[in-house]
Amino acid sequence: MGKLEGKYAIITGGGKGIGESIVKRFLEDGIGGIAVLEYDLNLAKEMITRLDTSDAEVLAIQCDVSNDNQVEKAVSQAMKHFGTVDILVNNAGITQDSMFHKMTDEAWDAVINVNLKGAYYLCKHVVPIMRKNAFGKIVNISSISAFGNVGQANYAASKAGLIGFSKTLAKEGGPKNINVNCVAPGYIETDMYKTVPTEIIEEHIKNTPLRRLGKPHEIASVVSFLSSDDASFLSGQCITVSGAATT
Ligand code: NAD
């Protein structure tokens, strides 16, 4: 029996990268169904074609997580389709990097609105369902940049915000059997990371004691663990998955 059997999940930004790997891992772990809330619906549809989804339904829903109306509609569409939400993974994220003294208000707002406010909107609509069910697992994807990283003041603030947000929801949701945790990936080979210049990549590898970049599936396995009853007494934590790298 898969460790996520009979469970229904919502994952944001699941069309590629770490999100796609989480969808794949959830399917391997026997999930009942997954709603993928994606900004780019084509990405989600292509992802579903790439994965073997014969044992569980993966529902692609177009949704910009920084838009409360769209999130509300997407959550009710997932509820209508699957009947419940047991697991929520806030994975959608963007970067708009620059040194702080050159950072625009637009870049600040865009990153905070997707990475932090997006998770807030999802939780706003999903936590009441979990409280009613007296069951829930929430995993928020943070980053080692949360602990400070040159050129990423907006991103670091959003990812550090997610840690405080998660620890607070864990304290409030605990009495209702809701576990809330963060995963803070290090340097992971995805499209987001492809924008990093080669010399910086070499520096990142040098700063990673395991001496390589991480793979998306190495984040997905930890997210699946945190979403399962194997982690039933684990809540309010931020698990760094970085090959021992710090920023
Ligand atoms: P990615 O760019 O490959 O994928 C991000 C996904 O989020 C895409 O499918 C994109 O369409 C979706 N998305 C973006 N904005 C959205 C919005 N407004 N609404 C809905 N979906 C949206 O990136 P990734 O590397 O797979 O990153 C996944 C998560 O992991 C992000 O939160 C990122 O910050 C975090 N992370 C990544 C790394 C890394 O090195 N790749 C390191 C630490 C943390």
Image: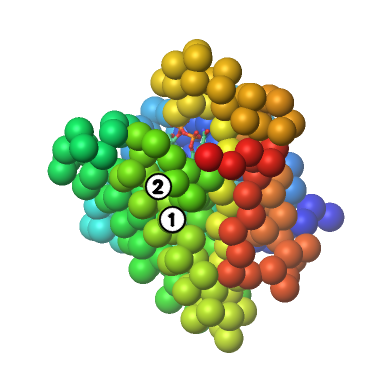
Secondary structure beneath disc 1?
helix
Q: Position of residue 193 (x, y in %)?
A: 48, 26
Figure disc tally: 2
Q: Position of residue 68 (x, y in %)?
A: 26, 58
| Figure quarter occupied by ligand 1 | top left
- In this rendering, would 77 be left or right of 230? left
Q: Residue furthest left?
A: 105
Quarter of the image where the N terminus is located: bottom right
Query: Looking at the image, do the residues carrying marks 1 and 2 touch, with CB atoms under 8 Å apart?
Result: yes
Residue highlighted by disc 1: 160
**Residue at the image point whose x is 29% and y is 31% from the top:** 98
The residue type indicated by label 2 comes to Ala
Q: Position of residue 65 (x, y in %)?
A: 33, 49
Dot 1 crowding, Cα within 10 Å, few <14, some 14–19, many 20+ = many
Residue 132's place in the image compared with 6, above or below, is below
Residue highlighted by disc 2: 156
